[in-house]
Amino acid sequence: MAVIMMRLDKFLVEMGAGSRSEVKKQISKGLVLVNGIVVRKPEMKIQEQEDVVMFSGKEYRYEAFVYYMLHKPAGVISATEDRKDKTVLDLIPDKKRPDIFPVGRLDKDTEGLLLLTNDGQLAHRLLSPKKHVDKTYEARISGIVTEEDIREFRTGLDIGDEKPTLPANLEILYTDPTKTESYVSIVIREGRFHQIKRMFEAVGKEVLYLKRIRMGSLVLDTKLLKGESRELTPEEVKMLINETGGEHAKENA
């Protein structure tokens, strides 16, 4: 099997140590050690899986993919960059990789679970309508949700797209007749634009608050406050990969 080699500066940039220019400056100053030996050449090739790299006193180990769970607050957009608004990437200051992105999107005013990763294969499978990965939300609705609404959600709704929505599970948690509001749980298997809001509009109601609590096997950690994040555990990653039939499941097991 051929040994894969990588430039030292490229390795450090991919591991989130800094920009290419910053990394090169630190290497030239003798602040980088490879297997205990000071290296001053950014172009030096290393075995990223084997060599031990120390940068400014911190050890860096190669990770092909990283995965973060974020408790997204309202007011933050699901994008990698924006000139006006704060993005979900701004909420992960200790991210190890500069190439992570949100898997799908939550509307600006929607809260809850958001997965961020640089694993494009997994992201594609999680978002593919063919995989039918369940996404569970809790919502506060203006109006009293009825059994008829539940049946319509289960059948599929015309929300103005070319095709009706796939069947969705709607559950009434409780209602507040004094405020004419309902608290519900919804499970969908798609990710259309403003889908849940449009589904309730189709039955004459309005979403006042929306929070995603689950995506496939991944459940929002109740210990995470709004705006907080953490890396996924190896078990969580393995479950996500396995349930979507990922070819690289064994590599991450």
Image: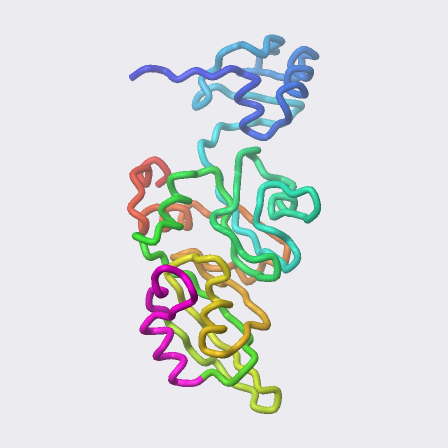
Q: Position of residue 98 (x, y in %)?
A: 57, 33
Q: Residue 113, relative to residue 248: is it above or below? A: below
Magenta span has 217?
Answer: no
Q: Nearer the viewer, residue 180 or 12?
A: 180
- Give left or right: position of 243 versus 202: left
Q: Which residues are magenta?
A: 146-168
Image colouring: rainbow
- Give left or right: position of 241 versus 34: left
Of the 4 image quadrants, the one containing the N terminus is: top left
Q: Residue 12, relative to residue 128: is it above or below? A: above
Q: Nearer the viewer, residue 143 or 91?
A: 143
Residue shown at the point (47%, 32%) measured from the top left: 63
User: Seen from this angle, which residue lies furthest bottom?
Assistant: 178
Magenta span has 152?
Answer: yes
Q: Position of residue 65 (x, y in %)?
A: 45, 36
Q: Quadrant location of residue 249?
A: top left
- Give left or right: position of 211 versus 85: left
Please tell me how many numbered marks the rendered image carries.
Answer: 0
Q: Quadrant location of residue 64?
A: top left
Q: Position of residue 90 (x, y in %)?
A: 65, 44
Of the 4 image quadrants, the one containing the C terminus is: top left
Residue shown at the point (52%, 41%) measured from the top left: 101
Dominant secondary structure (helix, strand or loop) of the stretch shown in magenta: loop
Q: Residue 56, relative to residue 205: is it above or below? A: above
Q: Residue 105, relative to residue 17: is it above or below? A: below
Q: Nearer the viewer, residue 228 or 60?
A: 228
Residue shown at the point (59%, 56%) measured from the top left: 72
